[in-house]
Image (spheres, rainbow, N blue to C red):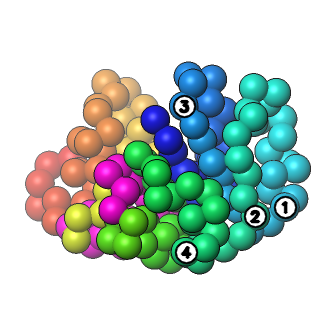
Amino acid sequence: MRVVILGCGRVGSTLAAILTREGHHVSVIDRDQTAFDKAAQRLGPTFTRETVRGIGIDEDVLRQAGIEEADAFISVTSGDNTNIVAAQIAQQRFHVPKVLVRVYDPIRADAYRGAGVETICTTTISAGLFHDLVLGRSLRSIQEYIDTASPRAEGRNA
């Protein structure tokens, strides 16, 4: 599988390393060269794929990373707006079959999920996990945490 990851922070570099170890072709985009330098240890010696320095909403940068042949695009920068716009470009302009985006803001994540953008809101998932752990409850599925924290879930029992 060919995967393009936008964001070479902790999540992006760790995911790139995992996918590379599994034999997938991975390209990582980040606007900051120091992100690649800091991530070198997380990427590890097995990461022999492409790193592209540039803005992830720039179509030329996306092309350089191989977006036109990508089976999946994952946007995990620290900025919700960048992640959402990049995901929409990958989905609508380049027709990437699988597009995933991390969004910190639960309300924004819910809105974009409702518009067909597959989002993962780490805020929602973390809050749900901590909630269950502090109350001594069994852990639920990721989807249950997403559904429970959705603004549309108001009025349902959590």
Check disc 1 and report the residue beneath it: 33
Q: Are marks 2 and 1 in contact (CB under 8 Å)?
A: yes
Q: Is residue 34 above or below residue 114?
A: above
Q: CA distance from mark 1 to mark 3?
A: 23 Å
At label 2, the amino acid type is Arg
Residue 91 image offset from top left, x and y in percent: 35, 65
**Mark 3 residue type:** His
Could you say which quadrant of the image residue 119 lies in?
A: bottom left
Residue 53, numbered circle: 2
Label 3 element class: loop
For residue 61, what is the image quadrant?
bottom right
Name the foreground residue: 137 vs 24.
24
Image spot of residue 127 (x, y percent): 43, 49
Which disc number belongs to residue 24? 3
Q: Residues within 10 Å of mark 1 (few under 14, many from 20)?
A: some
Q: Residue at x 50, y 58 (%)?
A: 67
- Cα–Cα gap, marks 1 and 4: 19 Å
Whether the residues at callouts 2 and 3 have beta carbons within 8 Å, the answer is no
Which sits earlier in the primary sequence, circle 2 or circle 3?
3
Give how far apart the Cα atoms at labels 3 and 4 are. Answer: 23 Å
Residue position for label 4? 59
Residue 1 screen position, x and y as percent: 46, 35
In the rendered image of this protein, does residue 28 appear above or below residue 63? above
Q: Earlier in the sequence, mark 2 or mark 4?
A: 2
Give the residues in magenta.
Answer: 95-114
